[in-house]
Image: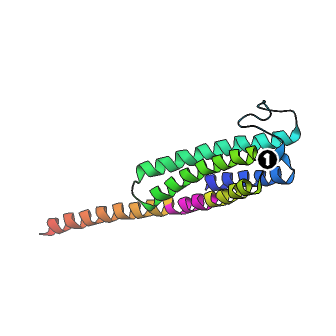
Amino acid sequence: MAQEIRACGVSIHSAIVRHTASGLACFGVPLCNDEWWPAHAGAHLQMLHRFFAVILGTYVIVVAATVRRRAPATRVARLGGLAIGLVLVQITLGVLSVYSMLALLPVTLHLGVAALLLVCNVALAYTLPARRLVAQASAAGQEGSARVGERARAFS
């Protein structure tokens, strides 16, 4: 669930960037006006948004790749693949938003993909514990049937 909390944090920070008109404070990617940390306060908000997004995107990709590796060909693996794809689309739309000077289409798509990414991560968060419980129950069931078999042999 930590991933979802981080995603909400980035989304809230994005709203602050949008409503303070800080989205136009930077005219380049990855640098903001040829600097990593410009002096302008609006640029600080924009760069913080970028830094938070890089941290969250990296975290999502690592978690999703791990899930795909540990549970291939499952619903969880498909959700992990979707999360990775959405992060890559989100990065592309973020860059397009900057270079288009916040044109309506890339900005709207950037917001929509952020919402889809949050939904995907919530679905992953709820699916993973269920898989763990099923695996534990399955393991317990196998142990239980083995014990029953041993007891049956002991009495015969």
- In percent of width and height, residue 29 lies at 72, 37
- Locate the C terminus and report the quarter of the image it occupies: bottom left
Based on the displayed image, in which of its 4 quarters is residue 26 positioned?
Answer: top right
For the rendered model, the colour scheme is: rainbow
Q: Is residue 28 above or below residue 23?
A: above
Give amino acid for label 1.
Met
The main secondary structure of the magenta stretch is helix
First to last magenta residue range:
118-127
Based on the displayed image, in which of its 4 quarters is residue 27 positioned?
Answer: top right
Residue identifier under label 1: 101
Residue under the image location 67 percent in, 53 percent down = 7
Count of residue discs: 1
- Locate the N terminus and report the quarter of the image it occupies: bottom right
Compared across the picture, whether 130 is left or right of 23 comes to left
Residue under the image location 77 percent in, 53 percent down = 103
Q: Is residue 104 above or below residue 101?
A: below
Compared across the picture, whether 19 is left or right of 14 comes to right
Nearer to the camera, 9 or 137 = 9
Residue under the image location 41 percent in, 59 percent down = 74
- In percent of width and height, residue 146 lies at 24, 63
- In percent of width and height, residue 140 lies at 35, 63
Based on the displayed image, in which of its 4 quarters is residue 4 positioned?
Answer: bottom right
Q: Is residue 46 above or below residue 37?
A: below
Callout 1: few (<14), some (14-19), or many (20+) C-alpha neighbours within 10 Å? some
Nearer to the camera, 130 or 137 = 130
Nearer to the camera, 73 or 3 = 73
Residue under the image location 67 percent in, 50 percent down = 93
Compared across the picture, whether 135 is left or right of 96 comes to left
- In percent of width and height, residue 78 lies at 47, 58
Check disc 1 and report its element: helix, strand or loop: loop
Seen as rendered, the residue at the extreme top is 35
